[in-house]
Image (tube, rainbow, N blue to C red):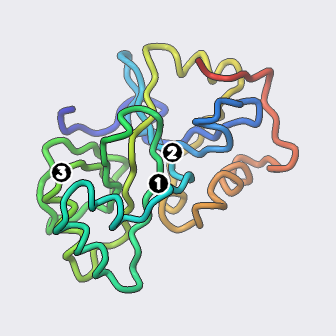
Amino acid sequence: MASTSASSHLAPGYLVAAPALRDPNFSGTLVLMAGHRREGAMGFVVNRPAPLSAPALLDNVDARLAALARARSGAEVPVLVGGPVAGDQLWILHRRSRSLPDDGEGVLVGRHLALGSSLPLLEALLRAEDPGPFLLLVGYAGWAPLQLENEIAHGAWVPMEFAEDLAFTVPVASRWEEAVRRLGLDPAGFAVGGGGAMA
């Protein structure tokens, strides 16, 4: 994936899963949209914790990075399940900085955030004294051409404007509910159209 800024009207932004969406991969999720083009769409679930810590995850990637993650006393790096596609691929959502190495595979998300996937980028973040917020995402969510548009039309998702704090500041367990409230809806009674499970 060439370095580029996110494009089209759904990216950067969020998709808020409607209760009618019963696909276990996406039920109750908040998805950060990184790209939306004619060829398809790409996003990352930002409210589903992975069943392992950053050091445990990195043990399988690079022992040196795992040791750096363990050394971050009191600054645990969140690990989230980004989606069901490419579950062996690791992405890093971070705040952009000139002090970080350029990630040729990176994707810009809004003005201040970027998604990268290089080990030098991750090492720089783990070594930095104050790297700013960042998190690790395992896998991603992908849609074929017009698939996402059809799901939105059937009430499976509600698009929402991009807000950086939803990916970093709001507690993971509260992100979906907070997004629903920002849409002006009550999480307890939220329902959209007929909805349905995704293919």
Marks 3 and 1 sit apart, C-alpha to C-alpha, by 17 Å
> SS at mark 1?
strand
> SS at mark 3?
loop
Question: Which amino acid, by three-letter code, is at mark 3?
Answer: Ser
Q: Residue at x 68, y 57 (%)?
A: 178
> SS at mark 2?
strand
Give the mark nearest the N terminus, 3 or 1.
Answer: 1
Q: Position of residue 88 (x, y in %)?
A: 32, 41
Q: Residue at x 72, y 35 (%)?
A: 18
- Which quadrant of the figure has residue 70? bottom left
The numbered mark at residue 80 is 1
Residue, far right:
189
Q: Is 85 in front, or is 101?
A: 85
Residue that numbered label 3 is attached to: 118
The numbered mark at residue 45 is 2
In which quadrant will I find the C terminus? top right
Q: Are marks 1 and 2 in contact (CB under 8 Å)?
A: yes
Question: Which amino acid, by three-letter code, is at mark 2?
Answer: Val
Q: Position of residue 115 (x, y in %)?
A: 30, 49
Give the mark nearest the N terminus, 2 or 3.
Answer: 2
Q: Is 156 in front, or is 61?
A: 61
Q: Is residue 178 left or right of residue 71?
A: right
Q: Residue at x 71, y 46 (%)?
A: 183
Q: Position of residue 180 (x, y in %)?
A: 71, 49
Q: Is residue 187 left or right of residue 147?
A: right
Q: Is residue 193 left or right of residue 121?
A: right
Give above or below for 195 relative to 99: above
Front tag of 1 and 2: 1
